[in-house]
Image (cartoon, rainbow, N blue to C red):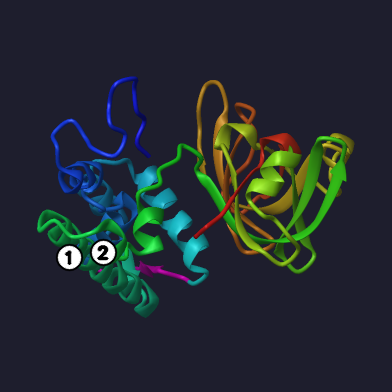
Amino acid sequence: MLIATLGENPGMPKNGSPSVAYINALSHTSADKRIDILRLIAQSGSISQAGRAAGVSYKAAWQAIDTLTNLAGVTLVERVVGGAGGGGARITPAGFLLLTAADQMDQARSQVLARLQQGGDLQAANLSPALTQLSIRTSMRNQLPCNVQTLDAQGQIVRVRLQLAPGVVLVSRITKESAELLALHPGRTVLALCKATAVSVIRMVGTAPKDQQPSRGANVLLGRATRVSRGETGDEVALTLDAGLQLVGFAQAVSGIRKGSKVSARVDESAVVVALSG
């Protein structure tokens, strides 16, 4: 998007060349750190080594794989138990296919930039929508593929029921304008996003506590803890939902949650963001 000031020509950048302006806007590498981590796991057979090589923590490396797995809808990395090194990780055939696709997209992007450098027209370059998608970054660690089930308009607010899996629903409260601009309709594929800090996790003992039962204005999702990071102010919990998706949230300090514990995750409807995935 070009923003013009008074006295300037909005169709011509200051350097006098539209092609150069497009190149400046797109010249950052399209490498996605999540893809980098997946590639490093393929090379080293270790998630911890891949995390160190990518300059991220072990926990962040796992989160990257969880997110990619959510988006791909298939298992990308398998644990390898035992061996001289005590076990590691192995890329699945689907994981290698994803890496191949990422490499091809990078090659396509390079070709587009080369055409722009030669003064080609931007429309003629035919930028792939996938290239735009790779450039998107967000601090929201929870990214869940889902389908719009229903839209319930209540004045200026729309409650969007999102189906994560058969029988598993997440509700998002957005404005009427947002629903219109996204052209949401039943059956549309979207992403549900929410910050890890907006997800409250508790350990389940028997039936769910009263304050964790589904209620108006809040979502409650059930699953099992897969990783727990202790902290003085709260425990960070990664969990696998009953729908099979990965989620990250926080529990109170000394929560008693351990790997394998049955847990419930609560997130307010207003904390769930709806995004188009393509």
Badge 1 amino acid:
Gln
Q: Which residue is mark 2?
A: 125
- Tell me where residue 124 sits by quadrant: bottom left
Measured from the top left, where is residue 220 in percent x and y?
77, 46
The residue under the point 49% across, 60% down is 278
- Tell me where residue 210 sits by quadrant: top right
Q: Please indicate whether residue 119 sits to the left or right of residue 91 in the image.
A: left
**Taking the image as drawn, is residue 227 in sight?**
no
Measured from the top left, where is residue 170 in percent x and y?
74, 51
Badge 2 amino acid:
Ala
Q: Which residues are magenta?
A: 75-83
Whole-number angstrom distance, CA of label 2 to CA of label 1: 9 Å
Is 253 inside the magenta-drawn segment?
Answer: no
SS class, disc 1:
helix
Q: Please indicate whether residue 80 sits to the left or right of residue 201 in the image.
A: left
**Taking the image as drawn, is residue 136 in sight?**
yes
Q: Please indicate whether residue 95 sits to the left or right of residue 254 in the image.
A: left
